[in-house]
């Protein structure tokens, strides 16, 4: 059975109706899941197994039957561990139907059909009794319901319901407890992901400064965690202001409350500075004694010899509502508040012993400036990148004349203000997507900089632009970063090209287009760890999970052409096995062509290693000698270690097979590639052969 799905094409801007298989969403969910990453997490798996064995033993020692409830079973791995450890029976609950079906096959394949019952329901719908899903309540509760923030996937209400209706009082729980930790830091780099820094622009009448609106300066932001691989953040990028403190713990063997609450801890700063960021992570004890511990602590807190890479659980960056000065040795109170699914923090000066603890509640932050709703963290960082902004200013200086009529096409951009300050006679600004929110945000910027009557905002689509919108003027300079909020892959920002094509009739004959062109670049790499998210697992802790491998492979092959996927590679170390190579060019001085742009060729492999895949990125050539690169910044040493643009996601195309070479003589001479840009769809199809 087929179904029609509507989507806005991020590259062409067109609304499309695509015929998809009824299982398309399932396949997308499975193909982009992190199941393989979890199955490759040796530390997690080993400690769960140890904890489950210990829990089953404690129940058996009491002379009881071991009845296990496994919520969120996934592949059924934890239930098979329990059955293997001697559990009498396991109820494995999985709400995602394709996953539940796979779990049934995996359980049968491993010989546990009579010991494990897979229940395809949400745990809150599971019934207990002679005619229910479970014959009786369980006395061992096993779960893996956690995300990077611990509670973001609804662990607390799930535990709360399970204790009320599905497990016995005093049950064993694996994990037994979770503990959340926090550390106060100052970091210009991370703070730049949350606030807008002033931009200085040289103008004919002196230096100008673009400032953020007061609404943004005082905005507390949003209560959404910024989850990153903190282990890739060098110590030089932040200053530690406090020791690590325990924020709260949850004992999963006892009834759990999911209702909103606050926790307050006292900190004594170890260094004076500006408190801006709370770094946070958690650990889980698989047993009551805490001897079996699985921690997410970053490298500066725990020994690197214990380091386990994982992408399903990372670390958290929380932004305080405002930066607060702290003095070494002068106590402050850190208040952490949570609801069922999220956490947020506030820092307050300690007021002494008599302080009323009822006053600690802090309301969930609500964004009042719109920026935190429209701009993600990399976009904030991009706008605060002074070197990047300088490239645009230098380029505008080269192309703007005193009589220039300038049209800007980019979402939430500084370019209109930069163009005005650099002397354009008239500046017009297109709004394309999410008009009302973007309009209010950018208008706040114009107003804060006294430009609301200097820059005209045009609220229409490029193909609907008329001469009256332009007051019967022709555009002499068309500029874009380009950046659009709908873009996921690097080439989605080619929407600028389509918009430029749509407004062709409104351009002067000698109009300048900035950027004048773009190029697509490619490089073959070996990943340090990211390969795990696509690598088959086979046997996990002695259990055959190849059914899961086949299921993921089938979903990845569901579409006729394999697709690249976006990843912020500054968080995922890799080394280059080839030199970077330009593979396609897009000339914005011309309109989008009717025919496809295709290229075939090969890239030579220069280093030994495993060919995990190819990385692709865009470079925008603003003017003849000035470019902005969204991908590889440099290959930092002879080993091929790469440094990537931290404000953009790069496209990663994982090879279907991996070639490993131990010596240079083993290295295949080249990787063959074929890349095609279809102007009708805006899509780039690619194929690689080792």
Image (cartoon, rainbow, N blue to C red):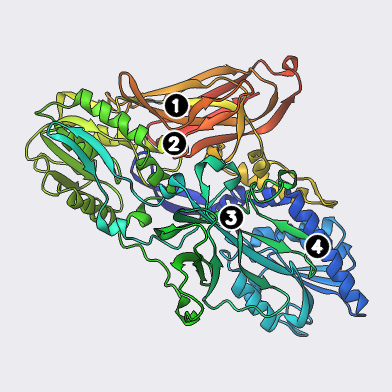
Q: Seen from this angle, which residue lies furthest front?
A: 329
- Marks 4 and 1, the one that precedes in the sequence: 4
Mark 4 nearby-residue class (10 Å; few <14, some 14–19, many ≥20): few
Local secondary structure at mark 1:
strand
**Image spot of residue 158 (x, y percent):** 63, 73
Kindly identify which numbered label has been placed on residue 520: 1
Local secondary structure at mark 2:
helix
Q: Is residue 514 left or right of residue 671?
A: left
Kindly identify which numbered label has been placed on residue 26: 3
User: Quick one: 566 or 529, which is closer to the camera?
Assistant: 529
Q: Is residue 125 visible?
A: no
The residue carrying mark 2 is 490
Mark 2 nearby-residue class (10 Å; few <14, some 14–19, many ≥20): many
User: Quick one: 1 or 509, which is closer to the camera?
Assistant: 509
Q: Is residue 71 above or below residue 329?
A: below
The residue carrying mark 4 is 291
């Amino acid at each position: 059975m087929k179904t029609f799905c509507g989507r806005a094409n991020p590259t062409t801007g067109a609304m499309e109706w695509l015929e998809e298989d009824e299982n398309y969403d399932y396949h997308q969910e499975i193909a982009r899941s992190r199941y393989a990453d979890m199955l490759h997490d040796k530390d997690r798996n080993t400690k769960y197994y140890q904890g489950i064995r210990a829990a089953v033993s404690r129940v058996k020692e009491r002379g009881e039957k071991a009845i296990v409830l496994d919520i969120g079973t996934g592949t059924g791995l934890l239930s098979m561990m329990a059955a293997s450890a001697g559990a009498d029976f396991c109820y494995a609950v999985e709400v995602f139907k394709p996953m539940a079906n796979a779990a049934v096959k995996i359980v049968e394949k491993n010989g546990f059909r009579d010991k494990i019952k897979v229940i395809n329901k949400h745990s809150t719908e599971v019934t207990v009794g002679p005619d229910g899903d479970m014959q009786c309540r369980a006395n061992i509760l096993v779960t893996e319901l956690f995300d990077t923030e611990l509670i973001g996937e609804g662990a607390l209400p799930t535990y709360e319901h399970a204790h009320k209706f599905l497990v016995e009082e005093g049950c064993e729980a694996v994990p037994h407890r979770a503990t959340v930790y926090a550390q106060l830091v100052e970091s210009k780099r991370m703070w730049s992901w949350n606030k807008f820094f002033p931009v200085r622009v040289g103008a004919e009448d002196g230096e100008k400064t673009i400032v953020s609106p007061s609404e943004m300066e005082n905005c507390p932001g949003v209560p959404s965690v910024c989850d990153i691989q903190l282990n890739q953040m060098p110590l030089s990028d932040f200053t530690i202001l406090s020791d690590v403190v325990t924020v709260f713990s949850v004992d999963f063997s006892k009834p759990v409350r999911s209702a909103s609450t606050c926790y307050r801890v006292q900190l004594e700063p170890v260094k004076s500075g500006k408190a801006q960021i709370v770094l946070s992570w958690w650990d889980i004890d698989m047993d009551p004694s805490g001897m079996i511990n699985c921690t997410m602590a970053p490298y500066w807190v725990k020994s690197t010899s214990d380091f386990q890479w994982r992408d399903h659980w990372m670390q958290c960056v929380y932004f305080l509502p405002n930066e607060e000065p702290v003095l070494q040795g002068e106590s402050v109170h850190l208040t952490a508040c949570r609801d069922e699914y999220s956490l947020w923090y506030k820092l307050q000066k300690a007021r002494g012993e008599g302080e009323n603890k009822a006053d600690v509640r802090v309301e969930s932050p609500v964004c009042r400036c719109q920026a935190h709703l429209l701009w993600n963290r990399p976009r904030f960082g991009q706008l605060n990148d002074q070197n990047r902004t300088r490239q645009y200013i230098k380029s505008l200086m080269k192309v703007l004349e005193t009589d220039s009529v300038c049209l800007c096409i980019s979402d939430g951009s500084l370019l209109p203000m930069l163009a005005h300050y650099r002397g354009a006679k008239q500046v017009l600004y297109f709004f394309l997507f999410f008009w009302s929110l973007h309009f209010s945000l950018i208008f706040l910027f114009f107003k804060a900089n006294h430009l609301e009557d200097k820059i005209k905002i045009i609220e229409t689509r490029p193909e609907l632009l008329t001469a009256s919108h332009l007051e019967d003027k022709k555009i002499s300079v068309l500029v874009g970063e380009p950046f659009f909020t709908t873009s996921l892959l690097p080439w989605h920002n080619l929407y600028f090209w389509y918009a430029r094509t749509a407004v062709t009739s409104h351009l002067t004959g000698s109009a300048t287009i900035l950027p004048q062109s773009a190029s697509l670049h490619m490089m073959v790499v070996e990943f340090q760890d990211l390969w795990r998210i696509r690598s088959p697992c086979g046997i996990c802790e002695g259990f055959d999970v190849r059914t899961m491998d086949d299921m993921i492979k089938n979903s990845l092959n569901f579409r006729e052409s394999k697709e690249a996927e976006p990843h912020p590679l500054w968080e995922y170390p890799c080394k280059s096995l080839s030199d970077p190579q330009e593979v396609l060019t897009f000339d914005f001085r011309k309109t989008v062509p009717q025919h496809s742009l295709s290229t075939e060729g090969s890239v030579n492999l220069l280093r030994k290693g495993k060919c995990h895949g190819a990385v692709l990125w865009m470079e925008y050539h603003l003017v003849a000698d000035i470019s902005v690169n969204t991908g590889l910044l440099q290959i930092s040493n002879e080993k091929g270690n790469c440094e990537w643009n931290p404000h953009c996601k790069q496209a990663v195309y994982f090879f279907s097979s991996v070639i490993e070479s131990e010596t240079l003589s083993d290295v295949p001479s080249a990787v063959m590639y074929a890349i095609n840009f279809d102007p009708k769809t805006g899509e780039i199809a690619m194929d690689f052969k080792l």
